[in-house]
Amino acid sequence: MNNAKHIMKNIKQMIPKTKTTFFCQSCGTQHNKWVGKCSSCNEWNTIIEEVIHKETKNDRLQIFSGNKDPKASNTSVLLQDIGLQDYPRIAVPGKELTRVLGGGIVPGSLVLFGGEPGIGKSTLMLQLALRLKNLKILYVSGEESEQQIKMRAERIGVTTNMCFILQETNTQNIFQQIAKIEPQLVIIDSIQTLHTAYVESSPGSVSQVRECAAEFLRFAKETNTPVFMIGHITKEGNLAGPKVLEHMVDTVLQFEGDRNHIYRLLRATKNRFGSTNEMGIYEMNGDGLREVTNPSEILITQREAPTSGVAIAATLEGNRPMLIETQALVSSAAYGVPQRSSTGFDSRRLSMLLAVLEKRCGFKLAMRDVFINMAGGIKVEDPGIDLALVCGILSSNEDLPIPQTTCFAGEVGLTGEIRPVNRIEQRIHEAQKLGFEKIFISSYNKKGLDLKQFSIDIITVSKMEEVFSKLFG
Ligand code: TYD
Ligand code: MG
């Protein structure tokens, strides 16, 4: 009897306690009971019960060798006494990625690389892995087989002998391989396919994704090895398995663009080691992604004769000036309700610009269809393209082409005033470099600007009404 009791007790100790919690699949918030609406992100029907099993304290320590005693606490240090350790960044091939990362890969950093399916995340990461010379790299794929990766590598057409491919989804097995190979850079494709034995819910669920990422975070910090994690994006454009990851990682990179266009934009939406203003442009070719080092040349269509509706904007993405072609088409509304459609430009902002034109400048656009397009399928966030867009709309409305050697840089305000934009000098220089002869800027931008340094004709405007007469005479 006594013996049986003893055995039962032993068995009970051997079976891990299962514990379940409720997670919002949208924002990752943990709830202790099921509710219909997440109190944190206000989404409905996103709470799902997930089985989690907390490991015993010593379990986790076996993952990596050479762990510090977790109980050893840190002591506070005076700021001036902290020595600056110079961590040399790992130089990456290609100017675009270098700039977006803020000058190369920081040792021990954890980078999340997000983007819609099919946009080219795996391609860019494999390209990075294959082109980094003299560095031992482990590329972990939970999505594709070794053969598929080999085929992709053949397409890209570069080979190094230092890139290991591992097809595996269990993090414990991955860490075993890592211990064996000792890579200097780890790439995970993708974090949503991984699962750790310490959490029992299915791969891709919030608790799994979070736990797997946490394991790699610990690995990166403890061994000073940089880790890149690919992550998928949900329909709404958020990183799936969600916001929790963004807090955890050092850098969040986003790969965006229209899948039907060949251009792809790489942005850093968070970067602990650099600016988030930078952007890289790539072109998807048959043999992988090619860097676009001079975007202005490809974003402006060379035409034989000027066409109405086309206006060139001198914009700025991060620190990089770039000239972009905006296209507008205004035509009589065939049906009762006029259509407004824009590609690559915020449609609410378009409505605002149209309202300004209607109210302040007396252009009757209410009964007309308006279509807007940014050449190359590129999404621009710089408000400095407003002026070009508005001029394009006017040009199409009146069917008067804008000369091909004219460009614009200015924001349009609600009262129809042309507002100044930042780094105007850089924009003017770029326009001049590309052979433009005329640039329209806000008169408020003129202050402190040495006009003599430019050979390009600078026309300053302060109101929308003025623009029309100065442009079309
Ligand atoms: P992929 O990197 O698999 O996208 P993701 O990992 O983000 O899901 O690439 C997707 C697309 O890129 C695929 O539809 C094929 C295309 N592609 C090319 O056009 N050229 C190439 O050299 C490669 C490798 C892919
Ligand atoms: Mg992929």
Image: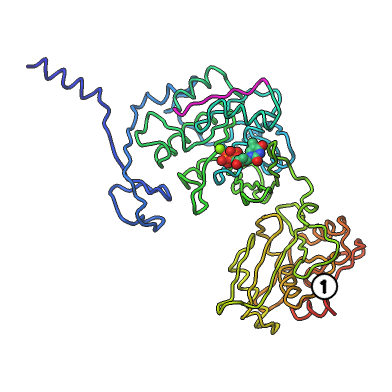
SS for callout 1: strand
The structure residue drawn at horizontal position 61% and vertical position 26%, both measured from the top left corner, is 150
For this orientation, the residue located farthest to the top is: 3
The residue depicted at 62 percent of the width and 35 percent of the height is: 125
Q: Residue at x 16, y 17 (%)?
A: 7
* Mark 1 lies on residue: 460
Q: Is residue 168 magenta?
A: yes
How has the structure been colored for display? rainbow
Residue extending farthest to the left is 1
Q: In the image, residue 433 lies at what x, y percent?
A: 87, 55
Left or right placement of residue 349 versus residue 207 in this view: right
Q: Position of residue 408 (x, y in %)?
A: 78, 66
Is residue 240 rendered magenta in the image?
no
Highlighted magenta segment, given as a residue range = 161-170
- What residue lies at 61% left-to-right and 68% top-to-bottom? 349
Is any part of residue 78 visible from this angle? no
